[in-house]
Amino acid sequence: MLTRLTALPRIPLGGGPLQLLLLVCSFALAAYAGVRLLADDWSGVALWFVGAALLHDLVLLPLYAIADRAVVRGLGAVRRREWAPYARIPAALSLLLLLLWFPLISGLTERRYRLATGLPADVFLTRWLLITAVLFGGSALLLVLRLRRAAKHRPPAVH
């Protein structure tokens, strides 16, 4: 009975000691980065995190939920519902790139960027549009290939 009370609960680690070591190192690195980040302006960083969470939860999440429903409804029949990821994934990646590079894509920091790097900042919008076109084009190509493969394996209809 005593061994049952003092025994530690087992934590399932599929990767063994190496996984545990990597997990501890990642927590240590995150703690170090957090201490360094919060050292100078902890109130500004905390305000930024709270603002980002509120912006995401109250504005962005409803917007992309509405956009996702529009894509699924726009595809029509239930059979075509499986086509939605071919629009979701490139849209999500494109929006993520827009979010990351928005100041440069919008031209809001063009002067500061040029002064800091000596490079022009007017190429970011064109490059983002090109990357978006490649993402959607590649996704459309994958969908066409999938549909062709499915058509080959489908038995012929009997009239």
Image (tube, rainbow, N blue to C red):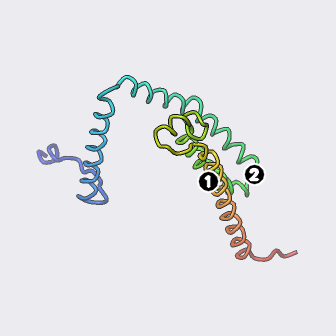
Give residue 29's position: percent from left, percent from top. 28, 44
Q: Which residue, given by chain and number where applicable, does mark 2 sit on?
A: 75
Pick the front one: 92 or 158: 92
Q: Quadrant of the C terminus?
A: bottom right
Q: Nearer the viewer, mark 2 or mark 1?
A: 1
Give residue 126's position: percent from left, percent from top. 64, 48
Instruction: Give the answer, above or below, for where 117 lies relative to 150.
Output: above
Q: Earlier in the sequence, mark 2 or mark 1?
A: 2
Q: Amino acid at mark 1?
A: Ile
The residue sitting at the right extreme is: 159
For label 2, the crowd category at 10 Å Cα-Cα, with few meaning under 14, some 14 to 19 and many 20 or more, is some
Pick the front one: 45 or 2: 45
Q: Amino acid at mark 2?
A: Leu
Pointers 2 and 1 in contact (CB under 8 A)?
no
Instruction: Give the answer, above or below, for where 6 lies relative to 55.
Output: below
Give residue 111's position: percent from left, percent from top. 54, 35
In the rendering, which numbered label is found on residue 150?
none
Query: What residue is drawn where x is 64% and y is 35%?
Result: 63
Give residue 37's position: percent from left, percent from top. 33, 33
Pick the front one: 26 or 68: 26
The residue sitting at the top extreme is: 43
Query: What residue is drawn where x is 30% and y is 47%?
Result: 26
For label 1, the crowd category at 10 Å Cα-Cα, with few meaning under 14, some 14 to 19 and many 20 or more, is some
Query: What residue is drawn where x is 60% and y is 44%?
Result: 95
Q: Which residue, given by chain and number where applicable, does mark 1 sit on?
A: 131
